[in-house]
Image (tube, rainbow, N blue to C red):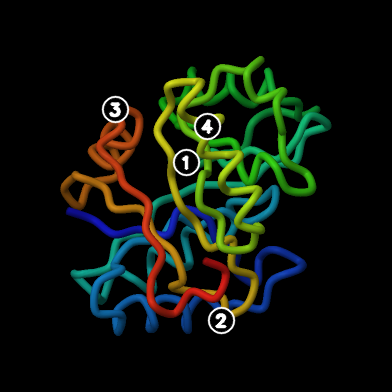
Amino acid sequence: MIRADLHLHTTYSSDSSINPKILVEQLHAHPTIKAVAITDHGTIEAIREVQKLASQYPDVMIIPGVEISTPEGDLVVLGAIRLPPKPWDAKGVTAFARKNECLVVAAHPYREYGLSDTARNYDLDAIETLNASSPSRANRLAEKLATEMKLPGVAGTDAHNVDELWTVYTEIRASKDVDDILDAIKNGFVKVAATGKSIHF
């Protein structure tokens, strides 16, 4: 069983102040959340550094990823070790994910820069139903969307500073292997949860 934050940003995102070293140290120190997906805005540059820092901690799991802004809305691509070709649009990003065995998640669909109801038009693998930076109403709408689309719901803090970390997580029935984690998410072996630290729920 893995508890993972599937959406957060490091200093490799221009709007984030989370230092990779501090992130890994906090992840190692956390009693239960031991995995994170690095999903910086439009870049995968942090992943190698974070994985190297995490390599000294056997309990810590780093999932590669990226958050891509498209004209239709933001998408999180889990498992991405390279970027989709530009120009970025929702159909192109999902096609890239299919070819590269990645997962596509609709990030905060009912918040600013989300896909909203247009998510129904795309070949998605999951919906972010619990985003710690979204109002509870937006998360409820995302839950409804996931149910109607028969897709798994996942959770991410969408953290941009250290104080926002560890408020929500996705419980994944998988081993500590990226491919196993991605398969488990795709097959719905997941549950979202908020921690006692959360202030939004």
Question: Could you tell me the amino acid type at mark 4?
Answer: Val
Mark 4 = which residue? 104
Q: Nearer the viewer, mark 1 or mark 2?
A: 2
Q: Earlier in the sequence, mark 1 or mark 4?
A: 1
Residue occupied by mark 3: 187
> What is the three-letter code of the residue carrying label 2?
Val
Return the residue at label 2. 162
- Give amino acid for label 1: Leu
From this view, report whether residue 3 is shown above or below residue 152: below
Rendered view: 10 above or below 175? below
> What's the CA distance linking mark 1 and mark 2?
22 Å
Residue topped by disc 1: 78
Give the secondary structure at mark 4: strand
Rendered image quadrant of residue 61: bottom left
Mark 3 and mark 1 in contact? Answer it, CB < 8 Å: no
Residue type marked 3:
Asn
Q: CA distance from mark 3 to mark 2?
A: 31 Å
